[in-house]
Image (spheres, rainbow, N blue to C red):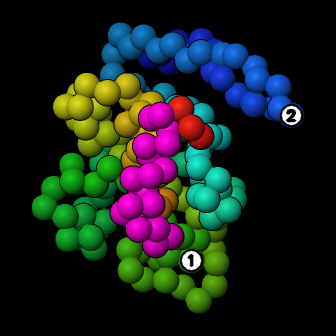
Amino acid sequence: MGFSIGDTVIMKSGVMECKQIIMHFTVPPSAEDIEVMAGIQMETLPEELLEYIDELEIVVEDLADEAMEEDLELDSPFDLLAHYRKGNQISPGVESKTQNDDDCLILFRRPILDMWCESGDDINNVLRQIIIQEIGQTFDFTDSEIYDMVERHHQGLL
C-alpha cells in the first residue's frame, strides 16, 4: 500500500480504545488504498445512514465508463465522484423487478484524488463526505440533513 496506518479511536461496549490513523503518502493512493480507507469510514457513518446500508459493497474504479457517462449525462467522467447502485439496478435509472446483487457504492478514484488535491483536506475527510453525500442523496435525505451529518463528524460528534 502507498500509506501507513497507525491507530484509530473506536468505542466498544462503552470502553474507548484509542488508536490514531496516520497516513503518509509517497504516491497517490491506489484503488486498493481507497477501498481500505472507505471501509474504515463505513464503520463510523452516522446512525441514520447505517440502517440503509447493510452489507453494502464498496468498489473503486478510476473513472465512470462511457455507458455510465452517457446514462447520467455527464460532461466529463471527472464530474462523478461516486455512484450508489442498488442491487436491482441494471443501469442508472433502469431497475429490474428482482434483486440481483447487494447494493454497491462505486467510488471513482481519479475525481476523488482531484478533489483531495484541490481541497487540501485530509483524504479520509474527503472520502467520508463523499460517502455520506452519496448515500444520503440515494435515500432522499435533505441537503440540510446531509450537511448536518458531515458537520457532526468534523466536530467530533459521531
Q: Observer-nearest residue: 51 or 61?
A: 51
Is residue 134 visible to us here? Answer: no
Quarter-of-image position of residue 36: top right
In the rendered image, the vertical position of residue 94 relative to residue 140, given as above or below: below
Q: Which residue is label 1 attached to?
A: 88
Rendering coords of residue 22 (x, y %): 51, 13
Q: Observer-nearest residue: 109 or 125?
A: 125
Q: Residue at x 44, y 46 (%)?
A: 150
Most frequent secondary structure within the magenta stretch: helix
Task: Give yes or no for contact between labels 2 and 1 (Cβ–Cβ under 8 Å).
Answer: no
Type of amino acid under label 1: Asn
Is residue 51 visible to us here? Answer: yes
Left or right relative to 19: residue 93: left
Quarter-of-image position of residue 86: bottom right
Q: Which residue is drawn at 38% across and 61% down?
A: 144
Magenta residue span: 137-155
Q: Does the magenta stretch include residue 43?
A: no
Q: Which residue is label 2 attached to?
A: 13
Nearer the camera: disc 2 or disc 1: 2
Left or right relative to 123: residue 96: right
Rendering coords of residue 62 (x, y %): 33, 43
Q: Observer-nearest residue: 60 or 151?
A: 151
